[in-house]
Image (cartoon, grey):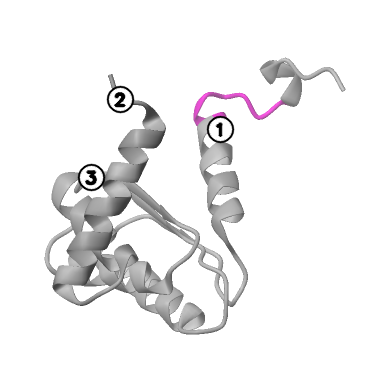
Amino acid sequence: MSTIAENVASIREKMAEAAKQAGTTRAVAAMHRAAREHPGAILAIGNAPTALLTIAEEMEAGLRPALVIGVPVGFVNVVESKEVLFAACERYGVPAIAAMGRKGGSNVAAAICNALIYSAAEMLDPSARGWNG
């Protein structure tokens, strides 16, 4: 039985090899794989603006994720990638959450995912989650 850490390491190795063979980044290779293996998934991106551009490209080719959360942080191609992704989502009717501008990050993507889970579980009230602060 393999551990989660071993599975993650294996996937990282596979993505690094796929990226090397394609002459691209691991983020791009990962988004192509996600589109192929999980076409109706929720895609949450907190880094790598190239991942957003790849999702938009995959949407042009027919991908329809359940939801795209696009919140990479930084300076290089961040604003543009969010605009391209959001336009593609609007064009194809795919729900999207994007932090327009340069702000965002993996922590923001995780916080959005957590908020959606709590909302879906009708547990927005902290006391419903057992917190008695």
Which numbered disc, 2 or 3, marks the residue that appears first in the sequence?
A: 2
Q: Is residue 38 visible?
A: yes
Rate crowding at label 1 as few (under 14), some (14 to 19) or many (20 or more) other CA atoms within 10 Å: few
Q: Is residue 30 left or right of residue 68?
A: left
Which of these two is toward me, 95 or 30?
30
Find residue 123 and report its image quarter: top right
Vertical arrangement, residue 101 with respect to residue 39, above or below: below
Q: CA distance from mark 2 to mark 3?
A: 27 Å
Q: Which residues are magenta?
A: 118-125
Q: In the image, is residue 18 part of the stretch drawn in magenta? A: no
Quarter containing the N terminus = top left
Q: On the image, numbered disc 1 is attached to which residue?
A: 119
Farthest residue, direction right:
133
Which of these two is toward me, 4 or 31?
4
Query: Mark 1, mark 2: which one is toward the viewer?
Result: 2
Q: On the image, numbered disc 2 is attached to which residue?
A: 2
Residue under the image location 28 percent in, 43 percent down: 10
Residue under the image location 22 percent in, 52 percent down: 14
Q: Amino acid at mark 1?
A: Ser
Q: Is residue 32 left or right of residue 47?
A: left
Q: Amino acid at mark 2?
A: Ser
Residue under the image location 28 percent in, 65 percent down: 55
Residue 59, given in percent of the width and then of the height, sits at 21, 65
Q: Main secondary structure of the magenta part?
A: loop
Q: On the image, numbered disc 3 is attached to which residue?
A: 40
Query: SS for tag 1?
Result: helix
Residue 8, given in percent of the width and then of the height, sits at 35, 41
Vertical arrangement, residue 54 with respect to residue 44, above or below: below
Query: Mark 3, mark 1: which one is toward the viewer?
Result: 3
